[in-house]
Image (cartoon, helix red, strand yellow):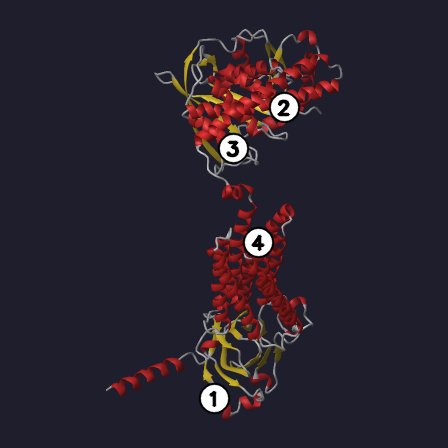
Amino acid sequence: MLHRFILLFLLCASNIAWGKASIAIIDDTHSTFNIGQSAFYYIDETKNLSYRDISSDEYSKRFRPLARDYLQFGIVQGNIWIRTEAAIQTTSQTPIILDISAPRLQHLDLFLPNLYGNQAQIELGGARPYTNLPIEGLSYAYPIPSNIPPIFTIYIKMSSHLPINANIELKTLSEATKDSQNEILITGLLIGVLLTLFVCNVFFFIKTSHAMYLIYGFMLVGIAVLHLTLHDHISQLFPNHPGTPERIYNLASLSCLTAVVFFSRLYLDTKRHLPNMDKALILIGSVNALFGVIFTMMPEKINIMVMSTMVVSTLIFLTFHAIYAFVKNVPYSGYYLTARVLLFTGHFTWILSVYGILPSQVLLEWGLTITIILEALIHFTGMIAQTTPLLQKYAHRRGYSQAEMFDLLSDLSSRLRRQINVIGGGIAHLKPALKSAEAKLFLDSSQVANNNIKGLIERVDVLTDIKDNLTSDQAMPLALNKLIDEAHENFLQLDQDDTHLTINTENTEQVEVLQNTTLIKHLIEVLAQEFKHFSDQALNLNFICHEINREGVTVLEIQCGPLPTRRHNQYSHFDLGMSYIQLVVDHLNGKLIDLSNTVTDENSQAHRSINIQIPIRVHLRQTQPLDQFADQFDIVLFGQSDDDMQKAQALTNHHSHKVEQFSELETLIGYFQRPDLRQSGSIILVFDNGGHIPHVTLQRLLPLMRDEDQCLLISKNVKMSLDYAQKLGFDDLLSCADIDDHLESRLTKLIQKGVRLKSSPLSRIKALRKSP
């Protein structure tokens, strides 16, 4: 009974082996056929058999079925003959090609006996000129002639002193093009990663001048060349020099290995930590470099197994070296050990696929490059850790308690404050004695610098107060608008860059703050200092006071943006910038929301901003904000007389301001050119209702306007954005449809802004205004 079961098993196995497709068919439903499923092979160990011999009845019986998609024969001392029957049964004249992907194959002959008899149709391979290829590409592609019989026979002869790995497919030209494009895409992504690492490496080498980065750069270049050679991207650069890609492959392979060895010396500083191991690394690296030259000069003279043995032996030694360094607690040996284990495992698996022990086309084509890239990324992470001064100090510093650090800050603040007071007194004493305008300018700059140092000391004091949970007493309530104005004036005394700052308020009239005014004012100053732009870009600070509840508590919302790109939102370490702002907001029981890439409307560009919401205790004081500055500002209306103009005129006539109306530009210009008519500042309402171009009008007015003058554009264009209007030079924008509801509030805001600019101790920075 046992013998019967064994016989049945062998019969089933033989049926499976011989039951594969016996003919390769391309038709309208099958655009690709793997020859490995229909072909038979025979190995001619004598290398003497011709096609006539192989096709005879004597040798035809010796062919055995392949029965696998990817053909991996390893190193073969002889010629491999592959035979298959094929049929083209497409209804349309679709180009069909025989596509043979065989990396580093030396000789490849193709026979189509149905057309050309005993003559080899084409001779390809790495040992032959690239110009022999009928279709240039990354594989050996041959177009099947259109006059081929419906059923024909293909013979393929392969030989090489290197391991033979091949994927042979019969496919349509469009399918072959698609596969080639996918391979080029993946190669491009991998080369892109290597290029990024190389650029970063060049940057670190320029900054540090450390030879480790130089050798690392050579290694990255070698990896890229190795991949391009393995995928036959190099052959087309040397079309008439067969064998050159093989030499380049050997040189790149052993150069990478040599670079890894010498890189290991510098990465772990073995000369200092492991002197005996350092000498061994120098010897191994030198031997690899020598054999790299030998394999490049005469690749066919030395068995490829020698190079494979050298590579594997070197990687084994480097892996043991990594373990030894890790045991000895050499700095950064953890990164090195991870990279070495990854490279050894990946390369050993790849070697098994090269020699056919572990059959895998994906592993053979992409395994080595991906492994080396991952290893390079691990090395790069360790290199950054070595280069970052903060991390270097962290490895050797002793820990201090939080209380000790705050005591140190308090002591530092008191020591600096005395010296700053001395410097400030000296500057104040010198200023009246100076007569030179240039000297006074330098002295003013010194005074601003002294103010900035005072501001930094104030931040240190705030940190200490927050740590001790101290709050300053407030004897009298402070108007919210006045608080904002004082913060703006303090910022102007600190600004060294002529910053463009735009302050907008909403629902802040008549609101008086009852507590934390000093800290809130300090927070506004810090926001302006930290987020100001060093260009003509304006920083917008919008203050919105929300509805007050029964307990007299409301939420003050501060919108700050656009933020400069130099500012980050990482809190991995504490600084006196973003981290400090977050600390102050938390102390005020508020919240900070980072709005990345926010867009205000369809006409605005994306930018990053922050939103701060702080609960404050307030009460309302009844005043008339629009009329209290009636003697300081006149209202000027300019535009054609229409319904919108009449509505605006009716609203402004309800107040005690002097109102002037103009419909002709030259008349308006004449008004501004007469100082006797201009006893007060002006709030100019420009209507975009025809008869003139608003931004041209503004350009004519700008040279005649005072610092406190404000210009409001009233437009029928509902799609126009505030950002665009400010870029034209206007201070604010109002839609004609919103005149009834929002004109008075806009006028109030512009008048307060004008008062703030008029009373500012420093000259006003004209944001976004350029004289023609």
Nearer mark to the viewer, of 4 and 3: 4
Q: Secondary structure at mark 2?
A: helix
Q: Is residue 546 left or right of residue 230?
A: left
Measured from the top left, where is residue 664 in percent x and y?
Answer: 67, 16
Mark 2 vs 4: CB contact within 8 A: no
The residue to which callout 3 is attached is 575
Which amino acid, by three-letter code, is at mark 2? Answer: Ala
Q: Left or right of 42: which side holds 433?
A: right
Compared to residue 565, the image places residue 23 above or below, namely below
The amino acid type of the residue labelled 1 equals: Arg
Task: Kindly check if marks 1 and 4 are in contact, taking CB atoms under 8 A apart as contact.
Answer: no
Residue 634, percent across and down?
Answer: 60, 10
Checking the image for residue 272, the label placed there is 4
- Sequence-first disc among 2 and 4: 4
Q: For the residues marked 2 and 1, what is the alpha-carbon distance in whole angstroms?
A: 94 Å
- Amino acid at dot 3: Asp
How many callouts does the rendering have?
4
Q: Is residue 455 above or below residue 59?
A: above
Pair 2/1: label in front: 2
How many angstroms separate mark 1 from mark 4 (CA)? 64 Å
**How far separated are the C-alphas under marks 3 and 2?**
20 Å
Q: Residue furthest front?
A: 276
Task: Return the mark for residue 62.
Answer: 1
As measured in the structure, the alpha-carbon distance from the residue carrying label 4 to the one carrying label 3 is 36 Å
In front of the other: 205 or 716: 205
Amino acid type of the residue that numbered disc 4 sits on in the rendered structure: Arg
Helix, strand or loop status at disc 1 = loop
Where in the figure is residue 425, as x and y percent of width and height? 63, 15
- The residue to which callout 2 is attached is 449
Residue beneath the point at 50% across and 27% down: 409
Secondary structure under badge 3? loop
Residue appearing at x 49%, y 69% in the figure: 361
